Every structure is written in C-alpha cells, then in structure tokens.
Image (cartoon, rainbow, N blue to C red):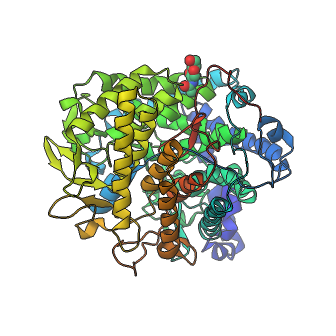
Amino acid sequence: MVVLRKLPGMPGWPAALGLRLPQKFLFLLFLSGLLTLCFGALFLLPDSSRFKRLFLPRRATASASSSSSASSSSASSSSTRDTDLPRSPPAAAEPRHASPAAPRRLREKLRTAARMAGPPARTAPGSRQQVQGGESRAQPASAAPPARETRAPFRFDYERFRRSLRHPVRGGRPGEDPETRARRMKIKEMMKFAWDNYKQYALGKNELRPLTKNGHIGNMFGGLRGATVIDALDTLYIMELEEEFQEAKEWVEKSFDLNVEQCLRLPLWRSIVWEGTTGIHGFIKGSPHLINLNGEASLFEVNIRYIGGLLATYYLTGEEVFKSKALELGEKLLPAFNTPTGIPRGVINLGSGMSWSWGWASAGSSILAEFGTLHLEFLHLSELSGNPVFAEKVMNIRRVLNRVEKPQGLYPNFLSPVTGSWVQHHVSIGGLGDSFYEYLIKSWLMSDKKDSEAKKMYDDALEAIEKHLVKKSAGGLTYIAEWRGGILDHKMGHLACFSGGMIALGAEHAAEERRQRHMELAAEITSTCHESYARSDTKLGPEAFRFDAGSEAMATRLSERYYILRPEVVESYMYLWRLTHDPKYRHWGWEVVKALEKHCRVEAGFSGIRDVYTTTPTHDNMQQSFFLAETLKYLYLLFCEDDVLSLEDWVFNTEAHPLPINHTDFKAAVQP
Ligand SMILES: *[C@@H]1O[C@H](CO)[C@@H](O)[C@H](O)[C@H]1NC(C)=O
C-alpha cells in the first residue's frame, strides 16, 4: 500500500498510466506478482517475527498517534501527557534548560576522514570484514524473539520515573534578568528558523542544504531518514516550541520507517518495497546507489543520534512511540556485536545484520570512540525493554577494555574486534577517542555514582592524559596534544574542546585535591578553546588549531580552517557556567550567537563556513543535524536557570540528548 500511495507522485509514472489498457493491465499484473513474491518471501524467513515487524509497528504507531494527536499542541496537552509529566505552565515563558553537553568528536572525525578519503565506508567493500556475515544473519533471528517475549509482560513504570526526578524537566521560572531572557529567546528563534527551513525544504531527508534549499541524505545512517527530526525533538521540546515539536512527532509517527530491510534477500524486490518509503525513482532509474542507501549505517551515529534522540524524547514526554522506535532500532544494531571479542564493528547493514569495519580504519579495527560510546544508551534500552541483552553487550566491551594492556595508561584509538588488542598507538582526546572518556564519567554519574568501575577507569585515563598529553604553550595556553606511539602532535581539534566540560563535570565529584586541580584544568582548556574562536576573524573557531611553528590556537593548514556548526566549545561553556557561574562563559556564548548570526545564517537556514579567518566566508551548504541537537541546545541552556535539565537529574549523551540519572532513592524528589 505504501508503494501504491507513492505511485501517482512518481516521475515517469503518468506515462505508465497513459498506456493502453492491455499494457496497463499487464504491467499491474507484473507489479502485483512482484508484491506477492515479496510478501510471500517474508513467510519463508526463519523468523516470522520479521513479518510482524513489517505490519505491527504501523498499528502500534497508529494507536500511539491517536492518543497523542489528541493532545495537539501547546495548551491542549490534556490526555496522558499531563498526568505523566509535570510541565511548566504552557504559555508561561521559556523553560530554563540546563544540561551538560555531549561531544560528537569521533563522528566528526569519521566524517572528516570520510570526506578526505572519499566515502570511506565505501572504499572498503573488498576489504570488509564480513567474517560474521553468516552468524550475523542468524543472530537477529535468534536474538529478536526473546526480546519480544520479555517485552510483552514487562512494562517500564514511567510515572515512577518522573517522580524520581529532583527538578521539573523544563525548569522553574523565578525572577530573572531581562537580558538573559532576551538572549535565550534569541536562541529559541534561531532554533525555530533552523527547524522551519528544514521542514520546508528537507523534511524526511537527513539534513538541510540551506543554500540550494534541498535535502541531504548522506551515507552514515543506512536506510534511515530524518536525522534532523530525531535530533531536533528534545531541543524543540525543551525550548517549548510546542507546535514544532508536534510537527516533528507527527513525522516520527507517520513517516519514520525502520523497516528498511524487508525483502532484502531479493534485491529487486527490495528496491521496490524499500523505496516505497522514499519514492520509487531509484527503482525506475535502476539507480545503483540504492544498495548503498540501504546499506552502510554507522553503529555509532545511529546510536548517538537516533537511539539517543528517541530515548531522550521518551523520557521527557512519556510518549510511547519514541520508546518503541528506540527499542526496535536497538535490536537492529545487535548483530554488529557478533564478533570473537564482542567488540562491535563500526558499520552495519540494518537490513541483513551484516557488519564490517570502516574501510579506512587500520586493519579491520574498531574505533575506541565508536564502540566506547554505546554504554549510556544501551543501559537505557535494557531499562525500557526489560531485556538485559543490551546491557550485557556494553558490559562486555567494558570488560575487554578493562583487561587489555594500556600503553602508559593510555587508550589507543584502534582495537581489533577479532583479537581484542590494539592495532596502532594513536591516542587522542579529540576525534576517534573523545567520547569514550566522556562515557566513562557519565556512566558513573548516570548510575547515581554506583558504577565505580567506570569512575576508576575514567580517573586512571585522565591521570595518564594529564601526565602525557596536557601541555602549556609558550604563550601560556593549556592544551591537550595527540600522541602517536610516543611522539606528541601539538594539535587540538575542535572536537577535543568538549573536554573542558567533561573534566569540569568529573572534577565536581572528585576528592578535594583533584577537584581543584581538575577544575582549573577544565577552565584553562575551555579558555584555550575560546582563544581559538577569539583569534579568528569570524569569532568562530577552526576545525583544528596548533601550537607549533610560532602559532598558538590558530589553524595552520588550509584544510583545517573550516567551521561546520560544531557544538564542543559552547558545550564546555555550558558546563563551566553551570559549575562555576562565572559570567564570562555567558559572554563567550553570546559572542558565538552573534557570530553564527552574522556568518552562518543564510536565507534558508544555517550553514557551515569554509574559512573562519575571512569575514567573507564561503558557505558549505550544510545545516548539520547536530546543530539543532547540540549547538543550539547548549547555547539555550547556557542562558537558562540551572534546574532546566538539571545536572542532578540528567546526563547528556554525546549528541546532547538527555538521559536520566538512575536515582535509586527518591528522598529528594520534588513534586513540581
Ligand atoms: C538502575 O539501577 C537499578 C538498580 O541498581 C538497575 O537494576 C538498573 O539496571 C539501572 N538502570 C540503568 C538505566 O542504569
């Protein structure tokens, strides 16, 4: 039916309809034959749950949407929502949000590497490690049913969860100064502008291309679509952009399709059925990229953006559709773990369950910041499904990492999923390494400080980093260098700038002596990152900056001068503000807002720029989804009261999606 609904809109289709009757009849006969074959094939699959998967989600969605569409927008959030959620007065004012940040360094790094090397994942087909192909295919079938069985009786108690929060989600609203409020409102307006343009020109695509006013799909998400919708949901909610939130939710209910894989084993049918969700032009043109569209999803990206965004929105709103989509998608990721060590590979085909390593990662290795950035989300998948398999997968990763020998106490970026040993000795707190460290400290915080293993691993890693990587420049700027087999590279990526916030967050809970030292370190690194912004002509920072050859906190290579709307620097501003209340962080954040407005805002959205050192920059024509998920959210929270997404209740995943801290005692809970 999906296919048929799409037909009238298809280019070339009118011509087909204009055929003479016998031809038309033959064609329809042919088409129905295809469909019959295709659906028939489903029954032959080993696991008939695949068949259910095709149809049941629609029904579940329909019921979820009927209950939720009843609660239209703003004020009318009558039905379930009011009882579930303590909400701030609907039209009152803006929420204060406060939240810690999350880096996406690794992913950016991947992206960058991909850009440099050509589509990296693609260069690999020959070298793909499909060792697991056979097993993987069997895996989803055998892994899925238990999940489904346990899910039926299991019910996550959402109301109990809400009662465990110490603060109302969107904050209280005591008297505040008008300037802060006006600044927050400005950032809210930027979010609305970014969303409205995405909605107008690119809804259902992954990202908006604001200059050409069309959508971008990319190759990181397999057949998944709507990355910007999923990434924007919780930001829209937190900013009380009610109407826009409903638009996004409606897209998730009606158009977010996880069944990208049906009929996979019959490539031709796949083309038809799968493309039914996006149009069948690919089929008509016989376009070869179909296979890629349906193929390579980054396990890491899908986890932090899609799973993270859906989980966060479920916890914020209590609406079932977000939970069920997250769980359904989570199950599709499981085959990636089917390796000798249980360390997942980086790329997975969401349809077939086949997984392989990035073509550009050395020797079929997995990447620290990828397999080390699953922990928070996977614990919540287990929490919400009642199925321990997700938690088991990430606890196993933890075990492998804890056991493997660390050179100088450092964690290199590449590990073999086959042997469980390091493949080369490159260490970075920027791309490829970054969010692994972040997830250690956040795992501990999310466990309500019970996961002492994570805390110890974080403390040890940070100690090694302090000892080997933290340096001070001639001009007195503190930075974190990269390490290549013992040789330092005096370079800091924009991605590494999240570390100011992370170290501050860890310091907050450290013993006194460390606390002070780490707080200073965090402030110094954040200040260095601010310098990288302040020393550019646009007041936006470059992709990477160096401390060598007489240069300080400036990009020295042409290829490192770009800024793609990244959040890491404002992320650190937000944490440092929350933890110190030094007004300079709000000043610095406001400088970023002004620079974004001046250099990145274009007629139809926000765009990255190619050179931060010229005031007439060229735009890169891309509004990254993380700009809505992270950059704008952290800026907004910077100008909110601390009880908006309070750090006492939430940790932010590396895409800035808030996940709740596991309060086990309810003593301090406040009723809003
Ligand atoms: C929260 O804590 C309980 C009890 O320690 C545990 O069973 C559960 O798995 C935890 N949930 C998460 C999401 O960590």
Residue placed at 28% from the left, 50% from the top?
478
- Residue 328 drawn above or below residue 34: above
Visible in this render: residue 340? Answer: no
Visible in this render: residue 465? Answer: yes
Side (left or right) of 523 relative to 6: left
Regarding ligand 1, which quadrant of the image does it lie in? top right
Residue placed at 70% from the left, 49% from the top?
253
Tally the marks. Answer: 0
> Which percent across, then down, holds residue 523?
39, 47
Q: Nearer the viewer, residue 485 or 29?
A: 485
Q: Which of 23 and 542 is in front in this view?
A: 542
Q: Which of 544 and 183 is in front in this view?
A: 183
> Which percent across, then down, holds residue 329?
56, 40
> Which percent across, then down, holds residue 320?
71, 38
Side (left or right) of 540 relative to 648: left
Side (left or right) of 197 relative to 103: right
Residue placed at 40% from the left, 81% from the top?
616
Q: Nearer the viewer, residue 19 or 45?
A: 45
- Residue 349 drawn above or below residue 535: above
> Which percent across, then down, holds residue 62?
77, 45
Side (left or right) of 132 relative to 547: right
Task: Classify the position of the C terminus by image quarter.
Answer: top right
Task: Classify the position of the N terminus by image quarter.
Answer: bottom right
- Residue 162 drawn above or below residue 298: above
Quarter-wise, where is residue 648 in the image?
A: top right
Residue placed at 65% from the left, 25% from the top?
151
